Structure formats: C-alpha cells, structure tokens
Image (tube, grey):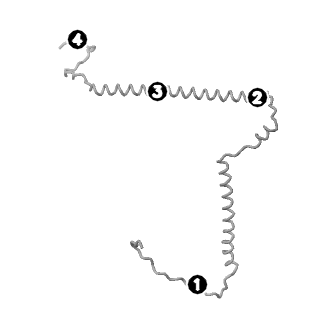
Amino acid sequence: MDDTPADITQQVTSQIPVASPIVKNPKCVEAGKRIAEKRRQAREAQAKKIAEADEIMANEALRKAQEVAKKAKEAVDPPVENVATPVEASVAAAPTLTTTQWLSIASIIVSLAAIYYKREELKGTIAKIKAPLAKAPTPMAPAKEPVLTAPKKKGIRSMD
C-alpha cells in the first residue's frame, strides 16, 4: 500500500461520453426573432402615441390656462363698450327661433292638450267608479250566483 496521501485537488470526470450539443430548429429560431422584432416595433409605436397624447394634453392645458388668464385680465380691465344704435339694439333683442325649437314648442303644446283630454276622460271614469260605491249594498240582497262557462279546449286551435 501506498502511504502517500491521495491528491484531492483533482476533479473527478465521468467516463460516459458527452452527448452531442442541442441543435435548435432554425425555423423556430427565425420565428422567435420575427416575433421579438414585432413586439419591439409595437412598443415603439405605443411610446410614440403616448408622447403625442401627452403633447396634445399639454397644449390643451396651456390653451385653457391662457383663456383663464385672458378672462381674468378682461375682468380687471373691462373693455370700452361700443354704443349701439336703437335699430341694432332692437334686432339683437329679438332672436329668431330655429325649426327644431318651433317643433319642440309644438310638441309641448300637443302633449299638454293630450293631458287635458286624458284628465277629462279620467274624471268620467272616476265618477263611474264612485257612483256604485255611493250606493251601499243592502244586507238582505241576495248574493250573485257565479256564471258557469264551458272549460276551454286544450290543444291546437284551428285558424278559423
């Protein structure tokens, strides 16, 4: 036996032969690259749209701020009013109604007339209902007998 200590610094290697490296399907690799490129382009397009939307919103906020500032300035320094002639004042005071407005007014009038008509009709109906209630039934009055009718036929009915 050998009294020398074993060298423990060496790495143990397997005697099993190494398998060949993994071969990828070139069609799948190409498809993956195309998908990655489409996603990259979609992200860039989305970033452009977001930037455009932010720009539009900023411009709108700036416009509103300018309008508020303009109104505040006009409130502080009211402009000199133009003196209008009496003819211009009468024209400005009598605005004309559009066709839609005339139609709206006509529909309101028609609906009011319908309500009035229905009110008269309802008054007559209520009066008819109240009239039998005013007459109290006498306790000696015979009870009404039920009307007997033939039962309805079940099944398919004729088209007559």
Image x and y of residue 59, in percent: 61, 26
Q: Give the class, few, some or many, for how many residues have Cα within 10 Å of label 1's Cα (few <14, many ≥20).
A: few
Q: Earlier in the sequence, mark 3 or mark 2?
A: 3
Q: Give the class, few, some or many, for how many residues have Cα within 10 Å of label 4's Cα (few <14, many ≥20).
A: few
Give the amino acid at mark 4.
Answer: Thr
Location of mark 3 (residue): 45
Relative height, residue 125 to residue 105 (above, below): below
The quarter of the displayed image where residue 152 is located: bottom left
The quarter of the displayed image where residue 54 is located: top right
Q: Earlier in the sequence, mark 2 or mark 4?
A: 4
Relative height, residue 122 to residue 144 (above, below): above
Relative depth, front residue between 146 and 130: 130
Q: How many numbered marks, from 0 up?
A: 4
Give the amino acid at mark 2.
Answer: Glu
Q: Earlier in the sequence, mark 1 or mark 2?
A: 2
Q: Is residue 39 left or right of residue 18?
A: right
Numbered disc in front, either 1 or 2:
2
Location of mark 2 (residue): 74
Numbered disc in front, either 3 or 4:
3
Location of mark 4 (residue): 4
Give the amino acid at mark 1.
Answer: Lys
Image x and y of residue 80, in percent: 80, 29
Q: Is residue 1 left or right of residue 31?
A: left
Q: Marks 3 and 1, how far apart in space?
A: 85 Å
Location of mark 1 (residue): 144
Q: Marks 4 and 1, how far apart in space?
A: 129 Å
Image x and y of residue 48, in percent: 50, 25
